[in-house]
């Protein structure tokens, strides 16, 4: 079996209209083990508030993930390691929520702040994705593009109920109204899904400053054709700015490679198949 190779790259940009960047992005690959992650947070609640909330979220998740690979983790079976990663993400997301709420209490001028969150972690061939809000995760491989997250937003609910088409939602005046975020209440419900990766793939994580301008077809075209693959982040940010750049723009790309492209084959639990159900929907505080 070919060794697993992981590489990541990320970029965040203030855009052409905003004066402050309220997005935060963190990327990491372990030099000794097949472990990598990308975190994207899109803050809200005023310039200083949004930037503060997204930084708290990104830094808290980074701290938890950076301490994941310890002796206890390595002593576990692969199945136990996967369970430990899921549990760690749940704990980290709740910790980030508490940190933001604490900052809001200590600083009244930040009382309206909050942030979306999307992150992807790969350990060997195990992929886990968590999100709150309308920042997204996509996967592209030789089967095409698959969106791995569903927006927590008012327009997404209207699409689901048949009140709007995706095209109408793109132009809606309430397209930025999200229904889940960190730092809004004591109770948070992140969606956490996981899959097994069975062929070479690219993962894109991004804020809505990108998807406001680039639809799934445009995203797929860039991921399929722009090389080297990690440089897609520059193309994404440049295109969003060229088309208007009304919001901050963040994009992170994680490249997974475990075998020559010509030998890639699908498997029953391949990432290209939709998950039958969500692995975790956190509905109450973990104690």
Image (tube, rainbow, N blue to C red):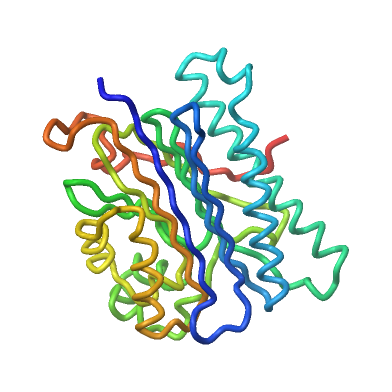
Give the vertical position of 120 relative to 152 (above or below).
above
Q: Nearer the viewer, residue 36 or 228?
A: 228
The percent position of residue 171, horizontal first and vertical second, equals 36, 84
The percent position of residue 255, horizontal first and vertical second, equals 35, 44
Q: Residue furthest left?
A: 262
Q: Nearer the viewer, residue 90 or 238?
A: 238
Give the vertical position of 125 relative to 121 (above or below).
above
Q: Residue furthest right?
A: 106
- Residue name at image x 24 percent, y 41 percent: 273
- Residue name at image x 25 percent, y 39 percent: 200
Give the vertical position of 245 relative to 132 (above or below).
below
Question: 135 left or right of 235?
Answer: right
Question: 281 left or right of 234?
Answer: right
In the rendered image, which quarter is residue 215 located in? bottom left
Q: Nearer the viewer, residue 25 or 31?
A: 31
Image quadrant for the N terminus? top left
Image quadrant for the C terminus? top right
Give the vertical position of 162 relative to 195 (above or below).
below
């Amino acid at each position: 079996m070919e060794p697993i190779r992981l590489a990541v790259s990320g970029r965040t940009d203030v855009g052409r209209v905003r004066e402050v960047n309220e997005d935060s992005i963190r990327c990491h690959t372990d030099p000794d083990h097949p472990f990598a992650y990308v975190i994207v947070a899109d803050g809200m609640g005023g310039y200083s508030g949004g930037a503060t909330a997204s930084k708290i979220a990104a830094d808290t998740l980074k701290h938890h993930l950076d301490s994941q690979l310890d002796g206890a983790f390595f002593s576990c079976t692969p199945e136990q390691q996967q369970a430990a990663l899921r549990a760690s993400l749940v704990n980290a997301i709740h910790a980030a929520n508490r940190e933001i709420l604490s900052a809001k209490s200590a600083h009244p001028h930040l009382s309206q702040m909050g942030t979306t969150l999307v992150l992807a972690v790969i350990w060997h061939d195990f992929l886990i994705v968590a999100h709150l809000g309308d920042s997204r995760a996509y996967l592209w491989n030789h089967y095409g593009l698959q969106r791995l997250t569903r927006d927590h937003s008012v327009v997404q609910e209207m699409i689901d109920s048949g009140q709007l088409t995706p095209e109408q939602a793109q132009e809606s005046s309430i397209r930025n109204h999200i229904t889940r975020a960190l730092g809004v209440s004591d109770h948070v419900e992140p969606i956490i899904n996981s899959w097994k990766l069975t062929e070479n793939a690219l993962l894109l994580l991004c804020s809505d400053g990108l998807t406001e301008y680039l639809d799934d077809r445009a995203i797929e075209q860039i991921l399929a054709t722009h090389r080297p693959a990690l440089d897609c982040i520059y193309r994404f940010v440049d295109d969003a700015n060229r088309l208007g750049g009304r919001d901050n723009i963040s994009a992170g790309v994680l490249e997974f490679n475990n075998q020559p492209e010509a030998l890639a084959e699908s498997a029953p639990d391949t990432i290209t198949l939709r998950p039958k159900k969500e692995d975790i929907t956190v509905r109450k505080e973990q104690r």
